[in-house]
Image (tube, helix red, strand yellow):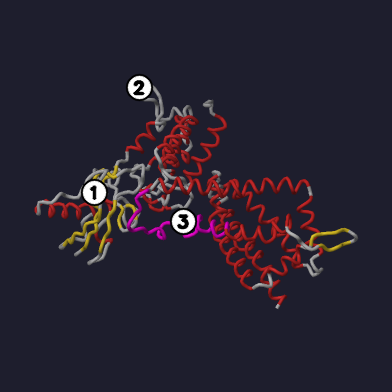
Amino acid sequence: MALTGLFLISFLVVHLIGNLQLLANDGGESFNLYAKFMTTNPVIKTTSYLLYATFIIHIVWAILLSAQNRKARTVRYAVTAGSTNSSWTSRNMGILGTIILVFLIIHLKNFWYEMHWGGIAKVVYDGVEVKDLYTVVEVAYTQWWYVAFYVAAMVGVMFHLFHGFKSAFQTLGLNHPKYNPVINTIGTLFSIIVPGAFAAIPIIMYVKSV
Amino acid sequence: MRITLKVWRQKNTQDKGNFKTYKLDNISPDMSFLEMFDVLNEQLVRQGEDPVHFDHDCREGICGMCSLYINGKPHGPKQTTTCQLHMRSFNDGDTITVEPWRATAFPVLKDLVVDRTSFDRVIQAGGYISINTGGVPDANEIPIPKKDADKAMDAAACIGCGACVAACKNASAMLFVSAKISQFSLLPQGQTERKTRAEKMIAQMDSEGFGACTNTGACSAECPKEISLTNIARMNREYFTAKVGSDNV
């Protein structure tokens, strides 16, 4: 969970850098060229297969471990006081992960599937035909409920990262009084800034559209 | 003090079990939780009922025998053993729910008594040092840095009560096993069997049916001996290096 989780965290950064180009005031040119690059460059394509595998391993492994953990306590307690000894996020990574998974499926259908196999209109930049993914995104973000769903999912990602970021280091054996404060601070900031920036993009685009 | 107890009663491992409610008057706030149970049992014996079975031994907080899950927390509201918990930690008129440790690896034998021999089997798998004993060696023959000795001693403070397993939402035994692995891996005497010890003890832990660690930290927060999560990180390091470096296939 830790290794795949850290790889997915690094993916978030790359994804965010790409998304930020949606805000460039050029009618979507830089974003569309970037989208073409990401779907055609051989290095990126190879990495993307690694990414798909990482997502699947992270999800399947989580399901297997959850099943094992349920089997480890078949008779439940009548009274529990989990909030007195651990954080809410640490106890609900499965629920948060499921929220993210639901978002991921819808998100992939709307943009990733459409980009690869959907009938997207094309635009021409300097004589080269490029799929106009920008317009697909722009149209999606004019619907308030889609924006609300997106923001809610990013809140889920934030809480998932609050625990996941630092937990990954503990699992990999890094627990040291010198580095723990650094990991915790970077983890908390990352968990707020990155999903926050993701969520800001559809909000800004929605506000522009009305 | 007047208290109402909701106690888990279960005849044997096969029995389904259920809660029974008992009312107690005249409980002294200075009584330990186990002494309060003694009062309850005397009352039950007088009434011709089967007394509530529970584990206890030293009643000094050092043996690790007592094991009650009180109001949703192992060893109750204070971070100590049940025998060191006093009735002054509760309020007059409280209802207190008492359950056994819940884990597949700790089957209930009767009432509040659970079978913790799975811990013993983990120790038997490698929680020892194989050295032929002879004359007592000189105390300073093997130099050990004070800091390492302190860390090993902190890990060795584990009394194996199982509160970590009881507290963990996954019933994971990682804190217990990591303390037992750490106390040896930090000392020169533990080096000879270091890698095989980590492999064998973790394999035994897995085969006993404990859950996986999700780093919630509940174990350490509830541990009466304050065993730190750094031990789990150390055990993970031991495991990785053992898997890479040991001769076992």
Using the numbered discs, state the Cα–Cα distance from disc 1 to disc 3 in whole angstroms: 29 Å
In contact (CB < 8 Å): disc 1 and disc 2: no
Q: Quick one: SS at disc 1?
A: loop
Q: Read off the residue under disc 1.
A: B10
Using the numbered discs, state the Cα–Cα distance from disc 3 to disc 2 in whole angstroms: 51 Å
Residue B194 image position (x, y, % from top left): 48, 31
- The residue positioned farthest toward the right in the image shown: A127
- In the rendered view, would you say A151 is above or below B63? below
Q: Output the chain of dot 1.
A: B
In contact (CB < 8 Å): disc 3 and disc 2: no
- In the rendered view, would you say B157 is above or below B35? above
Give the residue displayed 79% in from the left and 51% down from the top.
A40
**Count of picture labels:** 3
Crowding at dot 1, Cα within 10 Å, few <14 / some 14-19 / many 20+, comes out as many
Marks 1 and 3: same chain? no
Residue B229 image position (x, y, % from top left): 46, 48
Location of residue A201 by image quarter? bottom right
In contact (CB < 8 Å): disc 1 and disc 3: no
Disc nearer the start of the sequence (1/2): 1
User: What's under tag 2, amino acid-wise?
Assistant: Gly
Residue A151 image position (x, y, % from top left): 61, 67
Q: Read off the residue under disc 2.
A: B135
Q: Report whether B171 appears left or right of A171.
A: left
Residue B107 image position (x, y, % from top left): 31, 43
User: What's under tag 3, amino acid-wise?
Assistant: Arg
Instruction: Name the foreground residue: B122 vs A8.
Output: A8
Give the residue displayed 45% in from the left and 52% down from the top.
B217
Mark in front: 1 vs 2:
1
Residue A87 is covered by the magenta coloring: yes
Magenta part of the protein: which range?
Answer: A74-101
Q: Read off the residue under disc 3.
A: A91
Q: Quick one: SS at disc 2?
A: loop
